[in-house]
């Protein structure tokens, strides 16, 4: 089983290298939409990489022969990772808004109106 899996992984690696070196896709025009040839090449490479990842997870990590609970946790882990990525990616799209300056007032603890540049006191 491990030998067959190794041969399949090596064949997929050779296919990835061959596809990157020999296959050059041209742009495809579909009316107003144009699909870039580089996008098609990357899509093919990602499909091959996902196939290799599936083989490694299934056989080398023994998920294929595991219990239903192991399969469930494996699926949850691989669903959570992209979800976490998209949640954290939201922070990169937000406008940077610095907090107003903190004034060290060593006076009374009573609330005071402090005039700041461009700000209206509360």
Image: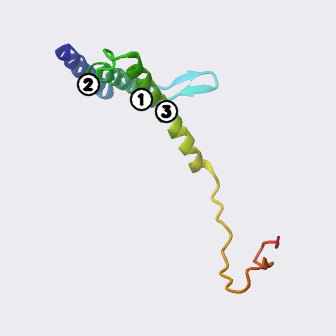
Q: Nearer the viewer, residue 109 or 83?
A: 109
Say whether disc 2 or disc 3 marks the residue closer to the N-terminus: 2
Residue farthest to the left, as pictured: 3
Residue 100 figure quarter? bottom right
Q: What residue lies at 66% left-to-right and 73% top-to-bottom?
A: 101
42 vs 64, left or right, is right
Q: What residue lies at 47% left-to-right and 27% top-to-bottom?
A: 76
Q: Nearer the viewer, residue 29 or 83?
A: 83
Q: Nearer the viewer, residue 103 or 96?
A: 103
Question: Which labelled disc corresponds to residue 42?
Answer: 1
Given this view, does label 2 or label 3 mark the residue nearer the observer? 3
Number of residues whose C-alpha sits closer than 10 Å to that of mark 2, classed few (under 14), some (14–19) or many (20 or more): some
Residue placed under numbered mark 3 in the picture: 80
User: x, y percentage for residue 23?
Assistant: 34, 23
Given this view, does label 1 or label 2 mark the residue nearer the observer? 2
105 vs 70, left or right, is right
User: x, y percentage for residue 93?
Assistant: 60, 48
7 in relation to 104, above or below: above
State the CA–CA distance, disc 2 to disc 3. 27 Å
Pointer 1 with pointer 3, Cβ within 8 A: no
Number of residues whose C-alpha sits closer than 10 Å to that of mark 3, classed few (under 14), some (14–19) or many (20 or more): few
State the CA–CA distance, disc 1 to disc 2. 15 Å
State the CA–CA distance, disc 1 to disc 3. 24 Å
Question: Which labelled disc corresponds to residue 13?
Answer: 2
């Amino acid at each position: 089983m491990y030998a067959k899996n190794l041969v399949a992984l090596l064949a997929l690696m050779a296919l990835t290298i061959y596809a990157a070196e020999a296959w050059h896709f041209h742009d495809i025009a579909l009316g107003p939409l144009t699909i870039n040839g580089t996008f098609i090449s990357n899509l093919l490479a990602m499909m091959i990489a996902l196939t290799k990842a599936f083989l490694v997870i299934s056989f080398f990590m023994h998920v294929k022969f595991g219990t239903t609970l192991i399969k469930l946790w494996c699926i949850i882990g691989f669903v959570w990772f992209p979800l976490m990525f998209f949640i954290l990616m939201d922070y990169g799209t937000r406008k940077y808004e610095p907090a107003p300056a903190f004034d060290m007032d060593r006076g009374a603890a009573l609330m005071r109106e402090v005039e700041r540049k461009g700000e209206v006191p509360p």
